[in-house]
Image: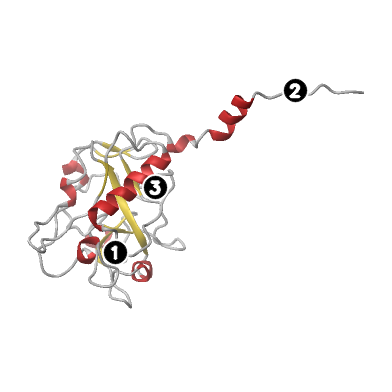
């Protein structure tokens, strides 16, 4: 007995193989946590390097251009340059995660207790939750360099790893993406200003960031 061969059109096969995950295709996505860090501790290549990381991951996930993606990071006044506030870099909102959930309506809502940033909603660009307290490894420490209201720290004590250019000097203020802390006070549970980095190298190396439950991850927002 002979069986007829059925040819599958090449174009159909390509469509099936090339279709990206639906979870990463929310066109109006405006917020995510990076699935991975740059890998060089607090040295992100400055704000430009951090923004490029956000843009690259958004592009790979299918919702990059025409949006401009910015990292939620502050810098401190130094070398004659003024401070930069994270809250001023991220647009006006509202911002939705990859699943279409509005995490904040506007800048004021984002910096209020009523925002929807939780472990369930602070998803990566792939639509995946970020490991938090109780998970192995814990990765909930997110680089921000910011005070609770999203503004920069005063010049002096470093909270930005030399404005995101050093993996050997300084420290970075961190937020908790799952809003869970070691204590019951509000500061320990802050999404953007929970505690400064620390570790055997001082606070800005990749090993330092991992030692307290981080991985050099960033919050990324669509600024337009």
Residue 61: x and y in percent read: 42, 40
Q: Nearer the viewer, mark 3 or mark 1?
A: 1
Mark 3 near mark 2, Cβ–Cβ under 8 Å?
no
Quarter of the image where the N terminus is located: top right
Looking at the image, is mark 1 or mark 2 earlier in the sequence?
A: 2
Q: Is residue 25 visible?
A: yes
Q: Is residue 18 above or below residue 145?
A: above
Query: What residue is rendered at 14% in x and 57% in y?
Result: 152
Residue 14 in percent (x, y) is at 58, 30
Quadrant location of the C terminus in the rendered image: top left
Labels 3 & 1 near each other (Cβ < 8 A): no
Tell me what residue is drawn at x 20 percent, y 61 percent.
Answer: 163
Q: Can you tell which quarter of the image residue 205 is in?
A: bottom left
SS at badge 1: loop
Q: Residues under labels 1 and 2: Cα distance?
A: 56 Å
Label 3 sits on a secondary structure element that is loop
Q: Which mark is residue 34?
A: none
Residue furthest out toward the bottom: 200
Residue holding disc 2: 6
In this rendering, would 154 be left or right of 42? left
User: Contact (CB < 8 A) between labels 1 and 2?
Assistant: no
Q: Is residue 177 left or right of residue 224?
A: right
**Colouring used for the render:** secondary structure
Say the numbered circle drawn on residue 124.
Answer: 3
Q: Check disc 2 and report its element: helix, strand or loop.
A: loop
Of labels 3 and 2, the one closer to you: 2
- The mark found on residue 42 in the picture is 1
**Residue that protrudes farthest toward the left in the picture:** 80
Characterize the local packing of mark 2: few (<14), some (14-19) or many (20 or more) Cα atoms within 10 angstroms: few
How many discs mark residues in the rendered view? 3
């Amino acid at each position: 007995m002979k069986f007829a061969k059925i040819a599958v059109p090449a174009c159909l096969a390509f469509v099936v193989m090339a279709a990206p995950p639906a979870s990463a295709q929310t066109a109006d996505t405006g917020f995510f946590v990076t699935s991975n860090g740059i890998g060089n501790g607090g040295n992100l290549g400055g704000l430009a390097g951090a923004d490029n990381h956000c843009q690259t991951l958004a592009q790979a996930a299918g919702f990059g251009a025409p949006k401009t993606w910015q990292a939620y990071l502050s810098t401190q006044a130094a070398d004659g340059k003024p401070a930069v506030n994270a809250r001023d870099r991220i647009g006006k909102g509202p911002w939705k995660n990859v699943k279409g959930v509005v995490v904040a309506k506007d800048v004021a809502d984002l910096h209020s207790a009523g925002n929807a940033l939780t472990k369930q909603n602070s998803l990566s660009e792939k639509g995946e939750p970020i490991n938090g307290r109780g998970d192995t490894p814990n990765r909930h420490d997110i680089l921000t360099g910011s005070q609770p209201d999203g503004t920069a720290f005063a010049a002096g004590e470093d909270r930005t790893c030399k404005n995101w250019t050093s993996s050997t000097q300084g420290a970075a203020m961190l937020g908790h993406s799952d809003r869970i802390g070691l204590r019951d006070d509000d500061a320990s549970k802050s999404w953007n200003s929970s505690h400064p980095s620390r570790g055997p190298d001082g606070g800005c190396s990749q090993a330092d960031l991992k030692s307290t439950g981080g991985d050099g991850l960033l919050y990324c927002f669509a600024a337009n």
